[in-house]
């Protein structure tokens, strides 16, 4: 039963995606708690983005889409998807924090929730080119 469920790509995406979302948000939160008073939240976002993208690529490539070979092409396309998400994040985070007065951790949680929705199709159809 568990093996049959794990064979479902969408289920694997949900599991690994939940882990990646938790991991990425945790990196942002830890960096905010360590350097939030001395480092701008956009710099913290940039650092957490780099660490999170590498972690996410490994998880999606190995566990979700089970790709072999062509690692650099996949990594390049994967990064293009995440650069789109990063651009949205750079736009949305200041709007939520500066204009709408959200706390940075709450603002980032909201942005992450929005970007997660689009990433599955983008990675499936573009990053890892699964037909």
Image (tube, grey):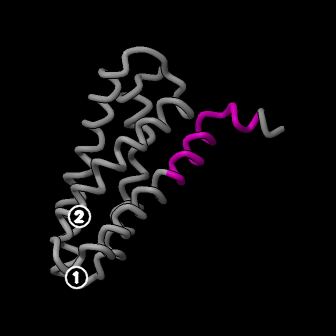
* In the foreground, 66 or 58: 58
Residue 59's x, y, as percent?
A: 49, 38
> Considering only vertical position in the picture, is 113 above or below 9?
below
* In the foreground, 62 or 30: 30
Nearer mark to the viewer, of 2 and 1: 2
Q: Is residue 42 left or right of residue 48?
A: left
The answer to which of marks 2 and 1 sits earlier in the sequence is 2
* In the foreground, 77 or 72: 72
Q: Is residue 22 left or right of residue 36?
A: right
* In the foreground, 108 or 10: 108
Query: What residue sits 37% from the left and 21% below the top?
Result: 71
Residue 39 on the magenta segment:
no
Q: Which residues are magenta?
A: 4-19
Dot 1: few (<14), some (14–19), or many (≥20) neighbours within 10 Å? Answer: few
- The residue that label 1 is drawn on is 100
Query: What residue sits 36% from the left and 50% below the top?
Result: 52
Q: Is residue 109 left or right of residue 15?
A: left
Query: What residue sits 36% from the left and 41% below the top?
Result: 54
Residue 26's x, y, as percent?
A: 42, 64
Secondary structure at badge 1 equals: loop
User: Which image quarter holds the N terminus?
Assistant: top right
- Contact? badges 2 and 1 (CB < 8 Å): no
- The residue that label 2 is drawn on is 44
Q: CA distance from mark 2 to mark 1?
A: 20 Å
Number of disc labels: 2
Identify the mark at residue 16; answer none if there is no mark. Answer: none
Residue farthest along the top direction in this orientation = 69
Query: What residue sits 40% from the left and 56% below the top?
Result: 24
> Considering only vertical position in the picture, is 109 above or below 90?
below
Query: Dominant secondary structure of the magenta stretch?
Result: helix
């Amino acid at each position: 039963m568990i093996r049959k469920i794990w064979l479902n790509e969408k289920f694997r995406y949900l599991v690994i995606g939940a882990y990646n979302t938790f991991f990425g948000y945790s990196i942002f939160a830890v960096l905010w708690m360590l350097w939030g008073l001395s480092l701008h939240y956009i710099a913290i976002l940039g650092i957490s983005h780099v660490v999170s993208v590498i972690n996410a690529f490994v998880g999606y490539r190995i566990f979700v889409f089970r790709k072999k070979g062509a690692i650099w092409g996949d990594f390049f396309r994967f990064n293009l998807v995440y650069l789109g998400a990063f651009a949205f994040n750079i736009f949305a985070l200041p709007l939520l924090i500066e204009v709408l007065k959200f706390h940075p951790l709450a603002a980032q949680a909201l942005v992450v929730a929005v970007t997660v929705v689009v990433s599955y199709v983008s990675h499936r159809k573009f990053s890892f080119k699964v037909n």
